[in-house]
Image: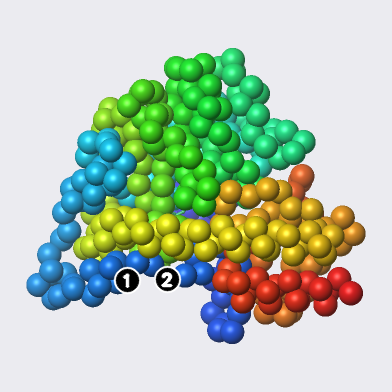
Amino acid sequence: MSRFWSKTVQELTPYVPGEQPKLTQLIKLNTNESPYGPSPKAIAAISQANSELLRLYPDPNSDALKQCIARNYHLQANQVFVGNGSDEVLAHVFLGLLKHDKAILFPDITYSFYPVYCKLYGIDFETVPLNAEFAIDIKTYLGKANGGIIFPNPNAPTGRALALSDIRELLEHNTESVVVVDEAYVDFGTESASTLINQYHNLLVSHTLSKSRALAGLRVGYAMGHADLIAGLERVKNSFNSYPIDRLAMAGAIAAIDDQKHLETISSAVIKSREALIADLNQLGFETIPSQANFIFTCHPKHDAGQLAQALRERHIIVRHFKQTRIDQYLRITIGTDEQCAALVKALQAILA
Ligand code: PMP
């Protein structure tokens, strides 16, 4: 605390990202990164940077990247917004599209950055409880006056996904505010709501290159929606940072998004490992929520989750444990390679013995 801090800063409770330990030799299953590398085409594109290119500012509008995304999702370039990771995109969404007089709605168990943005921008919010199976029940959102609705699909940290028909039902009923579907994990088995964008002008869908495209280190995210929503986000971005996408990120992101084959290969590998890991953990007595993401959310009825996380850490395996009501007996475990998953199962066998 310093007397020079503004009142706003004094009152903030910042988001705490999963740890990025400096140690090597760790099995890192705590921040939902991909265990595989990005498209080799992305690496090749980034490697082409030279001093002449880097001397100059990048395109402030990231037009080539927007065109690439638009092409891949059958949209127009003015229906695409890009930013420095989807966290930055979401920050602009909260300020630009979700800050109204009425409270916004999101699930009680969800991405823990949402309440942080609300606090930062002075946005009222109301949390809507997940049902007993930890699923979002769309009916609980219907008929509630709101300044906007946001949820991840699949949800984080539960991994559970909603069907496109549920999202459509919500959009049919919630016509007076923006509905944001945060699809950070969509490529691991969920149908994207991006196909509904031309039908529902209050729908915004956000994506990231950090998970399924294995480019968490590049920091690129994007949002897709009606051109008027995107124009609002551009106003915020142009009042904040003219050049959020640097030249390396732009080159890498375009090559990665165009390499659909690589995306499919590494996503199906993750899905296959996920199902095998769920089966192995359930053999050990874990109860695991069905997941459509690159992580699972699991608990053991006879063992404290915090202690399990600690015991794994002592064996150099890092998973995520949230000390939050309703979920403090769960572990969120990122799907690693088959070797990493096998090491996790072996370590848990030893801990539970
Ligand atoms: N949304 C959700 C649900 C997430 O879990 C994350 C990753 N922490 C993000 C958005 C942000 O990802 P990034 O900033 O790396 O694009």
Query: Considering only vertical position in the picture, is 168 above or below 256?
Result: above
Q: Position of residue 239 (x, y in %)?
A: 27, 42
Amino acid type, mark 2: Gly
Q: Position of residue 202 (x, y in %)?
A: 39, 25
Quarter of image, res 53: bottom left
Amino acid type, mark 1: Pro
The residue at the point 83 percent across, 77 percent down is 350
Q: Position of residue 232 (x, y in %)?
A: 30, 32
Q: Quadrant of the N terminus?
A: bottom right
Find disc 1 in the rendering and name its residue: 40
The residue at the point 37 percent across, 51 percent down is 221
Is residue 151 something one can see in this rendering? Answer: yes
Q: Position of residue 16 (x, y in %)?
A: 57, 58
Q: Quadrant of the C terminus?
A: bottom right
Helix, strand or loop status at disc 2: loop
Question: Mark 1 near mark 2, Cβ–Cβ under 8 Å?
Answer: yes
CA distance separating discs 1 and 2: 8 Å
Find disc 2 in the rendering and name its residue: 37
**Label 1 crowd (10 A; few <14 / some 14-19 / many >=20):** some
23 vs 300, nearest the viewer: 300
Q: Would the CB of label 1 be found within 8 Å of ligand 1?
A: no
